[in-house]
Image (spheres, coloured by chain):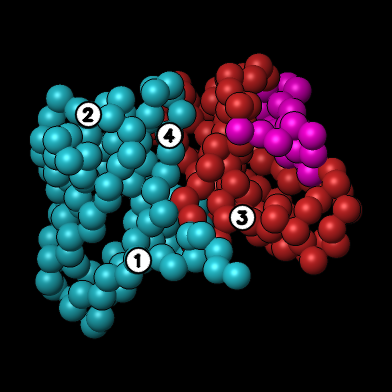
Amino acid sequence: GESVGLHLPTLSVQEGDNSIINCAYSNSASDYFIWYKQESGKGPQFIIDIRSNMDKRQGQRVTVLLNKTVKHLSLQIAATQPGDSAVYFCAENGDTGNQFYFGTGTSLTVIP
Amino acid sequence: EAGVAQSPRYKIIEKRQSVAFWCNPISGHATLYWYQQILGQGPKLLIQFQNNGVVDDSQLPKDRFSAERLKGVDSTLKIQPAKLEDSAVYLCASSLMGGPDEQYFGPGTRLTVT
């Protein structure tokens, strides 16, 4: 039978283009969100975070947008490079505030 | 600065056998986490330690999983007996003060249960 979670959403972009990765979170009580990048064979790596009192936060080549009304997060990567190829996860802190719950992830492939 | 170390990197066992994973966090990091990551899914927290005390183990299947951090530094995670559904990557992470934005992950141990 089919296993939940094996069909990872995928996104392919040309090198130099901008990438947008979306995430729908589940708990309206979540007030802190993080995007992680996970390369093959490695653990997740923190990219950027945002708290619920903000709609947008920018980092180096990355921007996170938060829409609390529809419980949606997006990660924008400017001028995508081959080194950006990885699986990207969003995580929310849920009711407890301390433990983070990861989404399924999106696999980004950058085409040279 | 050395990162989080984990061993072994790969392990294959038969169901009903036992297995143990080891983690050495970044020096000085008080908080240590063990996560389970099933293929195609995000990591799921199993247990969180602050020094040698357990902060959260609500998602740890305690009938078969156990973890310890006796001296507040290294940690071991054990599965006894293993089931097929335990096949996953087991990730260890550490942080200085417990904030997720400063959480550093190790490379993980890939467990295959046959």
Give the secondary structure at mark 2. strand
For disc 4, the chain is A
Q: Residue B108 in the image: x percent, y percent?
A: 60, 52
Between the residue at mark 2 and the residue at mark 4, the CA separation in whole angstroms equals 13 Å
Color of chain B here? red
Q: CB under 8 Å between callouts 1 and 4?
A: no
Span shown in magenta: B59-79
Q: Residue A30 in the image: x percent, y percent?
A: 31, 28
Q: Residue A10 in the image: x percent, y percent?
A: 32, 70
Which mark is drawn over residue B89? 3
Q: In percent of the image, x 31 and y 73: which residue is there?
A: A109
Q: Residue B110 in the image: x percent, y percent?
A: 66, 59
The residue identified by callout 4 is: A100
Between the residue at mark 1 and the residue at mark 4, the CA separation in whole angstroms equals 21 Å
Q: Is residue A17 left or right of residue B7?
A: left
For label 4, count other residues whose C-alpha is less than 10 Å away and answer few (under 14), some (14-19) or many (20+). many
Q: CB under 8 Å between callouts 3 and 2?
A: no
Q: In percent of the image, x 79 and y 44: which residue is there?
A: B79
Q: Is residue A84 left or right of residue B26?
A: left
Quadrant location, the C terminus of chain B = bottom right
Q: In percent of the image, x 60 and y 46: which residue is there?
A: B36
The chain that appears cyan in the image is A
Give the secondary structure at mark 4. loop
For disc 2, the chain is A
For label 2, count other residues whose C-alpha is less than 10 Å away and answer few (under 14), some (14-19) or many (20+). some
Q: Amino acid at mark 4?
A: Phe
